[in-house]
Image (cartoon, helix red, strand yellow):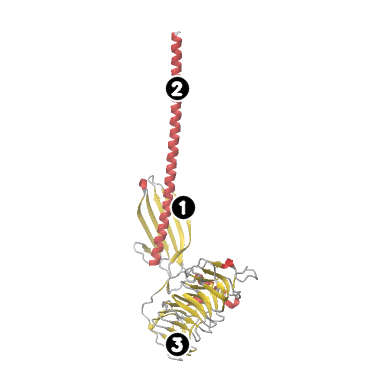
Amino acid sequence: MNRARHLSLSSQRGAALLAALCFATVLVIALGSYINVCYRTLALSTRSLHNSRSIELAETGMEDALWALNQNDWNGWTLAGTTATKTITGFNFEHGATGSISLRVTSYSGGGGTRAITVTGTVQQPDGSQLVRTLTGSSQEAPLFVNAIAATTSTVSFSSAGVVDSYDSAIGSYGTQTPGYSAIVASGAAATTSATVQLTNAQVNGYVSSLYSSGPSYSTSAKLVGPSTPVATAIDASRISTSPYQPVFSIKTVTGSGTVLANPATGSTTNIGTPGASSPEIFYATGLNMTGTTKIIVNGPVRIVVSGSFYIGLNGGTPSIEITNNGTLEVFVSGDIAVYGSGIDNTSRDPSRVGIYGTNTLTVPDMNTTVPYYGVIYTPAGCFTVGGNSTIYGALVAKKVTFTGSSPAVHYDVNLREKVFSGIDTPFAVSDWRESTNDS
């Protein structure tokens, strides 16, 4: 009996030990699996973190490339032909990971046009694997004339009537097209209790954009319409925005050798510019006061820098500046601006070929001429008044814009949204980009 009892106890102890060993084995396996899951989760989390850092590095590189383009500063870059390259290292992260950025800008030194930017952000992990993220984008100078009429900090107002619409000079003249609905009348004035865009009886085919929450003010004969606006609707609320956008860029200071342009004698004709010249010829004037039948003919690319006032016909007569099909004209004015008489006749009918830039903060610059003006006007710190029945094919940007005539017209050229003017210090911006991932 004792022997049987002893064997039974031994058997029970063996079974208990075996059960304990099995439980311990299961526990070890479970714990190992849990530790492995934790390790995998940590590895994935670390990889995700470093992957995010690789895109952050690429975005940092994109900013660095844009800075170099806008400052024209290529210190630290390797230049070969028209391609600039650069490598930035020294990024250290936790757990021994490191980072680097590779940059390449093609056509970095070109004139106007598109630059291609390729930026790669790389994070090397302690195990030797790399997380690579590449951004490829196109960068070009940002357009300035995105609106038909824009007041940078004050109002746009029509005292009576007027017409604002759009066309595309790239496909033909205004007269050969059905007027479009892409013109924008914008005011960047701070929101007030009074409308900052005052249409009165103006007819706008397009949009109005101002910070004023109640939209533009208008009389019973005013119209703001689009291509699908119901005929019975005079003011289409869907074409009113409270998010005006008008970039303000600096007007360049023109320097370098040039020719003194004396005030032309009354009744004289002066030819300037060389057809086919590769760069603009510069003319400096302390002031221009054209009267009588005085005429200046621009035969090539020309810049006129006026340190005083720029008057065409303000003091009588029918003087004019004529730009031939071979000519382009940029006028930089420090004083007052007045375009009267026969005005500025751009015979090419391409608004991107003529620009007037004013740096004065006076309120007197104005235009009142029966000859249509094909071009742009940019005086962001000064006011501009369009009098009479003047017609502008192009765009107008000023601190404050006022139309005082009974039937002025602004036919906005949508092609200006693709144009850059050499007299304006236009920054580079990324126009499009795409992303690719290459992990190794």
- Do the residues under discs 3 and 1 have CB atoms within 8 angstroms? no
Q: Earlier in the sequence, mark 3 or mark 1?
A: 3
Circle 2 crowding by C-alpha within 10 Å: few under 14, some 14–19, many from 20: few
Which residue carries the number 1 mark? 437
Q: Residue furthest front?
A: 193
Mark 2–mark 3 Cα distance, whole angstroms, equals 113 Å
Q: Amino acid at mark 3?
A: Met
Residue 90 screen position, x and y as percent: 34, 53
Mark 3–mark 1 Cα distance, whole angstroms, equals 63 Å
Q: Earlier in the sequence, mark 2 or mark 3?
A: 2
Q: Amino acid at mark 2?
A: Leu
Which residue carries the number 3 mark? 290
Residue 199 screen position, x and y as percent: 55, 74
Which residue carries the number 2 mark? 18
Residue 54 screen position, x and y as percent: 42, 52
Helix, strand, or loop for circle 1?
A: strand
- Do the residues under discs 2 and 1 have CB atoms within 8 angstroms? no
**Which residue is at 65% across, 70% downward?**
232
Q: Is residue 181 left or right of residue 327?
A: right
Determine whether 1 is above or below 181 in the image.
above
Of the residues tagged 2 and 1, which is closer to the observer? Answer: 2
Q: Is residue 129 left or right of residue 318?
A: left
Q: Amino acid at mark 1?
A: Thr
Determine whether 139 is above or below 125 in the image.
below
Depth order, front residue of 77/2: 2
